Image (tube, grey):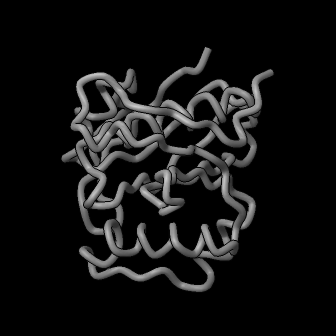
Amino acid sequence: MADLSSVTIGKAANQRPEAETPYVFRQIIHNSPDYLSLISLRDNILRRPLGLVFSPEDLAAESQDFHLAVFDEAGELSGGLLLHPVPNQPALIHLKQLAVSEAKRSLGLGRRLMTFAEAFAKEHGYTEIKLHARAEVVAFYTKLGYREIGERFVEVTIPHQEMRKSLT
């Protein structure tokens, strides 16, 4: 089995020149300085625009999750997400809170972070990923092979779509 604890990925095809910078994709530890930076990024991009804030209980509940992040060559956090094991469904993992910094958008980091997350999940024995995509990004996940499940629903005040992808 490949060790995916830290993977360096260089320029992706059809990317802006800034994408030539190598990026490091790796797991980060709950409550570490990198985790706190990722919480700040997720808060600024995903929560505050909706008038939401993380509670101490929200953050404590993430202690058993896998936190994955991407860093530029200077070691600055560029994006991240979390993978939440689904209780009583050992083959299923729930991908949540994908966020890429505004300055690093359009470099393919979201797509590359998803590829890293899928490989990480597969290496850890999961065979399917589910996620709740905001309605405006369903097409992004569809291009990555995710399929829509059921009807759209409201979560954290905005429309979402459950999506799933088999890793087998």
Residue at 49% of width from left, 43% of height from top? 23
Residue 8 image offset from top left, x and y in percent: 57, 37
Task: Answer above or below: position of 133 versus 76.
Answer: above
In this rendered view, identify the residue nearer to me: 54 or 4: 4
Q: Answer left or right for 128 relative to 132.
A: right
- Of all residues, the one furthest to the right in this rendering is 1
Quarter assignment of residue 3: top right
Query: How many tags in the picture?
Result: 0
Residue at 67% of width from left, 58% of height from top? 28
Instruction: Please identify the quadrant where the C terminus is shown.
Output: top right
Residue 82 image offset from top left, x and y in percent: 56, 53
Instruction: Please identify the quadrant where the N terminus is shown.
Output: top right
Residue at 40% of width from left, 42% of height from top? 21
Residue at 60% of width from left, 85% of height from top? 56
Q: Answer left or right for 49 relative to 65.
A: left
Q: Answer left or right for 125 relative to 153.
A: right
Residue 41 image offset from top left, x and y in percent: 41, 69
